[in-house]
Image (spheres, grey):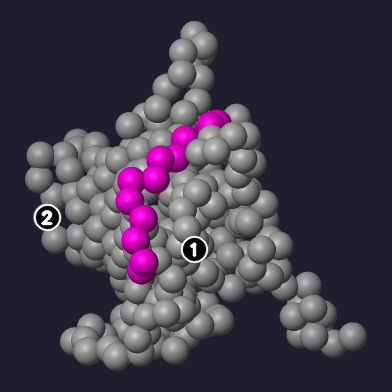
Amino acid sequence: MPEAASAAATRAIIGDSEFDRDTTVTRRAPGVYDIDLSAGWTIINAVNGGYLLAVLGRALADALPHPDPFTISAHYLTASRPGPAVVRTETVRTGRTLSSGQASLFQYDDEGNEVERIRVLASYGDLDTLPDDVRTSAQPPAIPPMDQCFGPEDGPAPVDGSSAIADRLMLKLDPATLGWALGRPSGKGEMRAWFGLADGRDADPLSMLLAVDALPPTAFELGLKGWVPTVELTVHIRCRPAPGPLRVSITTRNLAGGFLEEDAEVWDSADRLVAQSRQLARVRLG
């Protein structure tokens, strides 16, 4: 079998991929779900915030009468660890086109106390029922072709802060936003990349919750180093993405008091704006 055909035959599909398995929650009782958070989605020792959002998003999709997240806002209270966790959901309101719910993820600390890690409030609907009318001034980001961009595998050595999550992503960064990796940050709060899952699984609403939080922090291009933990993250899913890689553009305009905002746009292969997000993150200065 030709190499290209063999690769296509082994591509993971939505519902049967590592991402799907690692975000699967098991319903223990109405509104209560168990999961073992995978170490495969960690940054240093902490579990990635986008992966956590996808876990809670999957639990809410099971708990609510509508299938797709339209908007989901998360507050990250304490850093999550790989291992057992419990998600508790609550239905806030159900309507004909939208339903709203909240969810929290809990783990136990070293003393055996239950600790809330993340709390979300979300509205769900059915993306397939939305009208096709689009009126926008937004434009897809100008990113060079994928073969002119660079991923972690293109570096001579692992970048400081690299992590297990990098092995599960297909990430190709725009060279114009890679000055930080060469010791020459641009001073602009910008990061752009082609994004996909390493096993070839196409994007869906849940994986876009990961995509908005999967690129290196824009703080790196501002000349800062180290962990940039998310305090709050809100994601809007605008439509179901077409097959193929996504383009993700993230910008920061204001760093003040040790906090910065990141605004992300996610575009699909059909040049549609399929997701947007804003997050507040803490940075270490000096």
- Residue 95 place in picture, x, y as percent: 34, 61
Residue 37 horizontal side relative to residue 123, left or right: right
Residue at (33% x, 32% y) in the render: 77
Which quadrant of the figure has residue 104? top left
Residue 251 horizontal side relative to residue 159, left or right: left
Nearer to us in this view, 143 or 21 = 21
Nearer to us in this view, 51 or 91 = 91
Circle 2 residue: 254
User: Is residue 89 one of those drawn in magenta?
Assistant: yes
Q: What mark, if any, has residue 67 been given in the picture?
A: 1
- Residue 200 place in picture, x, y as percent: 65, 71
- Residue 143 place in picture, x, y as percent: 37, 81
> For the C terminus, which image quadrant?
top left
**Res. 15 in view:** yes
Residue at (25% x, 58% y) in the render: 278
Q: Main secondary structure of the magenta part?
A: strand
Nearer to us in this view, 207 or 3 = 207
- Residue 51 place in picture, x, y as percent: 49, 50
**Element type at mark 1:** loop
Nearer to us in this view, 225 or 166 = 166
Query: Which three-letter amino acid code belongs to the residue tagged 2?
Result: Asn
**Element type at mark 2:** loop
Q: Residue furthest right?
A: 1
Q: Residue furthest top?
A: 111
Residue 38 horizontal side relative to residue 224, left or right: right
* Among the two numbered marks 2 and 1 on one chain, the one whose residue lies closer to the N terminus: 1
Look at the image and give the residue range highlighted in magenta.
Answer: 85-97
**Res. 178 in view:** no
- Per the model, the C-alpha gap separating discs 2 and 1 is 35 Å
Residue at (50% x, 49% y) in the render: 63
Residue at (64% x, 68% y) in the render: 14
